[in-house]
Image (cartoon, rainbow, N blue to C red):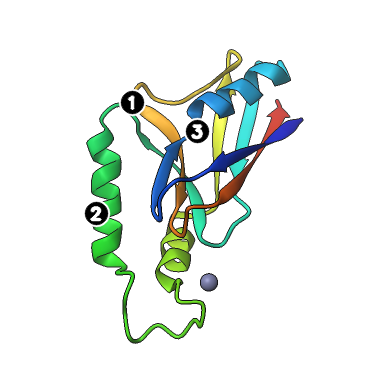
Amino acid sequence: MGEVIRVRTTKHTSIVNITPQVREVVRKSGVKEGVCVVYVPHTTACVFVNEGADPDVVRDIVYALEKLIPWEDPAYAHMEGNSAAHIRSAIIGNSRIIPIINGELALGTWESVFLADFDGPRERKVIVKIFKE
Ligand code: ZN
């Protein structure tokens, strides 16, 4: 069971809260107990779970990533010129596993699922798979 969610990002760096779309896939599956796998099949985008209540948290994550892994660096070798996007995505990771309990994603009160695009804007795919316990 599962679905592919398509997300059109709007900025060069876009962090998109995809929790409603992932919840909808879980709801449609009818699975009450199991796991939800969220996978992003892109090399310059990734997925993470973190605070969705205060948008400043996402802002600070973007700030810190840009500081740690700057867009420009004369030592980068990759010809395409988007090494920073590859590195940020590789570090964060392109999948997450979220338990399903009582038919709902078992996210914490303040948690949301985010698609991060570091080389947008583009259309990104998010593969959501549901496994029954
Ligand atoms: Zn590249």
Report the front residue among 40 and 103: 40
Q: Which percent across, then down, holds residue 90? A: 48, 62
For label 2, the SS is: helix
Q: Are marks 3 and 2 in contact (CB under 8 Å)?
A: no
Q: Give the residue type at disc 3.
A: Ile
Residue found at x 30% / y 59%? 65
Residue found at x 49% / y 28%? 19
Residue, disc 2 = 63
Q: Which percent across, then down, holds residue 14? A: 41, 47
In the picture, the quarter occupied by the C terminus is top right
- Distance from disc 3 to disc 2, alpha carbons, whole Å, reads 21 Å
Residue 54: numbered disc: none
Give the image quarter of residue 2: top right
Residue found at x 46% / y 60%? 119
Q: Mark 3 or mark 2: which comes first in sequence?
A: 3
Residue, disc 1 = 110
Residue, disc 3 = 18
